[in-house]
Image (cartoon, rainbow, N blue to C red):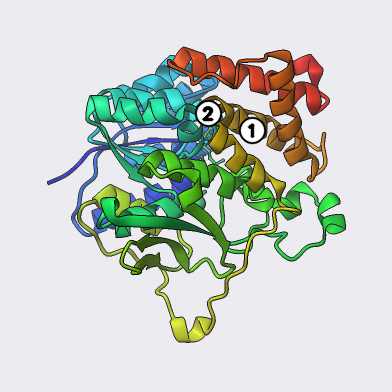
């Protein structure tokens, strides 16, 4: 049976790997007709995606690019829309499966459009879950949407979560990022190019920087807690530089189940797109003899304070995780633009959270009860982070 798919963020790293998986499945006679695709502004990549996938609808986030996108896509039989309403339409259109692979909280509303119609949502975008947390999970339950984690650690847990009620703890593995062995002095001088040169995974720039600060693992800790319903003190993080074990589930009888594989996002993407089945995917096969060693070490929260900040935010509650993720988006952007240094990313996030506690006392203490309240916290955290990152004009 063919299942239709929409891809939010088709031009990104996960989006491009999703195209490869769809093409490979098509080659095996498994049709996945594409309903809708979205991009922010990279029209050339969007055109290539539309040529390959032949979607019915393409949305571009930047409304000023509507006529350029229409011209570029002319003749492909694709309806084109632009701006926030078009992104939401892409999520709302009747695809059976929706790949949520926009980066950042910008992915929340289009993903919610898919959740609200009870779709199967392959969730790569972790920020929308960190941002809206419990509300997002409640909405998925209320609308009968199925969340299929694509983030490799969460996909690994999902694959081995045979007895959710018999779990003792979860372990998320982390590669340690490009600065795992760097001194704090070296990290202080790290450039965006160095931060984006991940040793194991090829990814978009924002998540690459998050991997370098370990904020990515912090966001994943929050993601795992909301997604699987476990408290912070039953989820730990271990650095595993070979990125072969993607995460582990410890059961009450002492058994530990893990999912292993080469570090290639096509594996979790294919699993989420074909679930509950599996399909052949031409990823490199795991060669344990060649790997020879799998090593593990405790994360260093002195050099990587983002992990501590994320755990504290999770312990404090949903408004703080919203604020943490929003402030981090601004801090990462400021680092990539050369306005702050690498170590300032975490200190900006920490200062933004303290600023909110002082200037807008009560904002972080209250559990957001609506998406409007989530948006208000998100915006306040962005303003605070912009002030601290030295760009008050944009605040
Ligand atoms: P990329 O930066 O490579 O791609 C981001 C995508 O989102 C692009 O399609 C981009 O469009 C689009 N986009 C960016 N900003 C906006 C916006 N404001 N509104 C609408 N669309 C926007 O990111 P990745 O593919 O690396 O990551 C996507 C998500 O998946 C992230 O949340 C990340 O944490 C998560 N993830 C990624 C993994 C990976 O291996 N890359 C692994 C696990 C999770 P355009 O190209 O036009 O700019
Ligand atoms: Mg991950």
- What residue do we see at 46% from left, 61% from top? 264
Distance from label 2 to label 1 (Cα)?
A: 9 Å
Q: Residues within 10 Å of mark 1 (few under 14, many from 20)?
A: many
Q: Quadrant of the C terminus?
A: top right
Of all residues, the one furthest to the front in this rendering is 253
Q: Note whether 94 is above or below 221 in the view shown.
A: above
The x, y position of residue 283, in whole percent, is 39, 66
Relative horizontal placement of residue 295, taking residue 155 as reference (left or right): right
Q: Mark 2 points at which residue?
A: 105
Rendering quarter of residue 88: top left
> Residue 374, percent across and down?
51, 19
Q: Which residue lies most toward the left here?
A: 1
Where 192 falls versus 47 (above or below)? below
Callout 2: SS: helix
Left or right side of 225 for 238 = right
Residue 230 position (above or below residue 158): above
User: Which residue is nearer to you in this view: 195 or 283?
Assistant: 195
Name the residue at 68% across, 30% down. 330
- Of labels 2 and 1, earlier in sequence is 2
Report the residue at 42% width, 38% height from top.
Answer: 226
Question: Residue 269 at x, y = what percent?
Answer: 37, 51
Q: How crowded is mark 2: few (under 14 residues within 10 Å), some or many (20 or more)?
A: many
Label 1: which residue? 329
Question: Which mark identifies residue 300?
Answer: none
Q: Which of 315 and 7 is in front in this view?
A: 315
CB contact under 8 Å: marks 2 and 1: yes
Whether residue 40 is visible: no
Which element is circle 1 on? helix
Q: In this view, does 355 lie to the left or right of 203?
A: right
């Amino acid at each position: 049976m063919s299942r239709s798919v929409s891809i939010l963020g088709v031009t990104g790293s996960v989006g491009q790997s999703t195209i490869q998986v769809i093409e490979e499945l098509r080659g095996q006679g498994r049709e996945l007709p594409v309903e809708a695709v979205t991009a922010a502004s990279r029209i050339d990549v969007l055109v290539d995606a539309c040529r390959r996938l032949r979607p019915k609808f393409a949305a571009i986030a930047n409304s000023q690019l509507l006529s350029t996108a229409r011209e570029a896509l002319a003749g492909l039989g694709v309806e084109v829309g632009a701006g926030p309403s078009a992104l939401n339409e892409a999520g709302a259109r009747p695809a059976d499966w929706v790949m949520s692979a926009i980066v950042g909280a910008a992915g929340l509303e289009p993903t919610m459009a898919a959740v609200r119609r009870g779709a199967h949502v392959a969730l790569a975008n972790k920020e929308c879950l960190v941002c809206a947390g419990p509300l997002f999970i409640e909405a998925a339950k209320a609308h009968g949407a199925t969340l299929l984690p694509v983030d490799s650690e969460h996909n690994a847990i999902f694959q081995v979560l045979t007895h959710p009620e018999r779990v003792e703890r979860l372990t998320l593995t982390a590669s340690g990022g490009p600065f795992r062995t760097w001194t704090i002095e070296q990290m202080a001088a790290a450039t965006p190019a160095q931060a984006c040169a991940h040793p194991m995974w090829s990814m978009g720039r924002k998540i690459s920087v998050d991997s370098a600060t370990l904020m990515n693992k912090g966001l994943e800790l929050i993601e795992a807690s909301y997604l699987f319903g476990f408290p912070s003190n039953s989820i730990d993080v271990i650095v595993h530089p070979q990125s072969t074990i993607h995460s582990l589930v410890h059961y009450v009888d002492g058994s530990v189940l893990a999912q292993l594989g080469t570090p290639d996002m096509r594996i979790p993407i294919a699993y989420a797109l074909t679930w509950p089945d599996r399909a052949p995917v031409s990823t490199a096969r795991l060669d344990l003899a060649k790997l020879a060693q799998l090593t593990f070490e405790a994360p260093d929260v002195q050099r990587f304070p983002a992990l501590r900040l994320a755990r504290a935010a999770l312990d404090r509650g949903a408004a703080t995780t919203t604020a943490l993720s929003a402030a981090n988006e601004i801090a990462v952007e400021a680092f990539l633009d050369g306005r702050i240094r690498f170590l300032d990313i975490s200190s900006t996030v920490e200062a933004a959270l303290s600023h909110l506690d002082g200037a807008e006392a009560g904002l972080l203490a209250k559990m957001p009860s609506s998406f409007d309240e989530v948006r208000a916290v998100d915006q306040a955290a962005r303003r605070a982070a912009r002030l601290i990152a030295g760009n008050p004009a944009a605040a």
